[in-house]
Image (cartoon, helix red, strand yellow):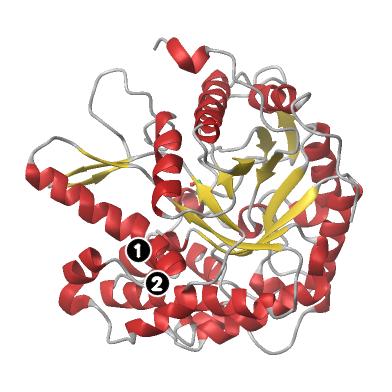
Amino acid sequence: MTHTGPQSAPIPPFPADFTWGVATSAYQIEGAAFEDGRGPSIWDTYCRTPGKVLGGETGDVACDHYHRWAADLDLIQSLNLNAYRFSVAWPRVVPQGRGPVNKAGLDFYDRLVDGILARGMQPHVTLYHWDLPQALQDQGGWANPDVQHWFAEYALTVYGRLGDRVASYATFNEPWCTAELGYHVGRHAPGIQDLRTSLLASYHIQLAHGRAVQALREQNTTAELGTVLNLYPVDAASDDPEDEAAARLADAKINRWYLDPVFRGVFPSLAVEHYGAAMPDVDLAALAVARQPLDFLGVNYYFRQWVSRDGVSRAGPPTPGTERTAMGWEVYPEGLYRLLTDLHRDYPVKKYYITENGAAFDDQIVGGEVRDEARVRYLRTHLSELRRAMHAGVPVAGYFAWSLMDNFEWAFGYSKRFGIVHVDYDTQQRTLKDSAKWYRDFVTGRRAARPVAR
Ligand code: IFM
């Protein structure tokens, strides 16, 4: 595959105060699943359900980050980054989801935040990245209306300890995955396969987001508040009206179902009408609470949705030469430009972060080196498109590569490697891939002096 044209031209400078980071999530890296009072999460249960996760793998040990956090932070610092995005495991902090707080769990995140600041980096916290306490799932999980209050209480518990040392709090990571994959398709925990329950879960997630933001605002926090969505440009596979209608509907179900409540306090009518009788009997006016002033929107970008009347594909056009990752996802850097410029037209917000962007490839470690040229190219072309969107006026303040290191890729277990750092799961040895070195060198000289620890 040749890569010529604007994508290989030099990338213009980024603002000196741009946030450069890497992202991870608790269940994917921490391990120590049953240590220091952590309660079980829905992923502990799901992983133990035969046939759900490839090879029966679990996050019990993962990257052992719970014990190796200090060395992992040193690693991030060695990449000359100024930010680290991680998530807090609800069951580590409140083992039963509500009620007694686990001091040891909060201590862990307290040390982590101090460790990030001590290394001259900003902590960016996600409150929910898919690991619901099992005790709450036993009461219906995201399908139980009370979950909005449980979540707001949990958010306050985390804030009560980490406070304004944190640069930003995101309420949710990719709520589409929680509702659609967890409650409709059943390919994620808790493995439910029911459309109405899934729609109900998505509704409660919106209310929970709104209530948590309200609760945190009442603390007069100086941390930025926002949420993180997985968003996609959506293209019809042809100009056939049926394909085009399918693309509009896919956009409403995947993107706007999550954007409209947060920015407009409603679900998109196209999708509501489409769901028809499957819609749960809920008070749609109550969605107004989801519309809270936000300091940022986190955008996770991986691929576009390629839609025909027969379905939605992540693989892009069937054109020979289309580059795909080990997940089968189309590599489509222009999509980041298109997504951001469209977003800013339709849902303007004062600041965007690219909270995830990256790719899995079949990396090999040979003689201590990982020559992941495809990932270097991926990062470079996406950063180029990001810069182009910024030039077009989209106020993007930061970029977080997904992911710091190889980790537990949910139903795929450890078979998919998204890290810019290679992890040998037998020895827990971390090795910088070429992409990590490239990212380090790219960022070096582009970033401002390290911020003073707050
Ligand atoms: O690993 C996931 C992450 O947990 C959420 N966003 C997408 C990543 C790659 O699939």
Number of callouts:
2
Q: Which labelled disc corresponds to residue 202?
A: 2
Nearest the viewer among 55 and 346 is 346
Residue lying at 31% horizontally and 35% vertically, measured from the top left: 315
Q: What amino acid is at disc 2?
A: Ser
Q: What amino acid is at disc 1?
A: Trp
Q: Which labelled disc corresponds to residue 132?
A: none
Q: Quadrant of residue 427?
A: top right
Image location (x, y in percent) of residue 348: 48, 53
Where's the C terminus, which quadrant?
Answer: bottom right
Q: CA distance from mark 2 to mark 1?
A: 9 Å
Where 252 falls versus 243 (above or below)?
A: below
According to the image, label 1 marks what residue?
Answer: 257
10 Å neighbourhood of mark 1: few (<14), some, or many (≥20)?
many
Image location (x, y in percent) of residue 165: 83, 62
Nearest the viewer among 130 and 55 is 130
Where's the N terminus, which quadrant?
Answer: top left
Which callout, 2 or 1, points to the residue nearer the camera? Answer: 1
Q: Quadrant of residue 396?
A: top right
What kind of element bears circle 2? helix
Residue lying at 56% horizontally and 53% vertically, measured from the top left: 298
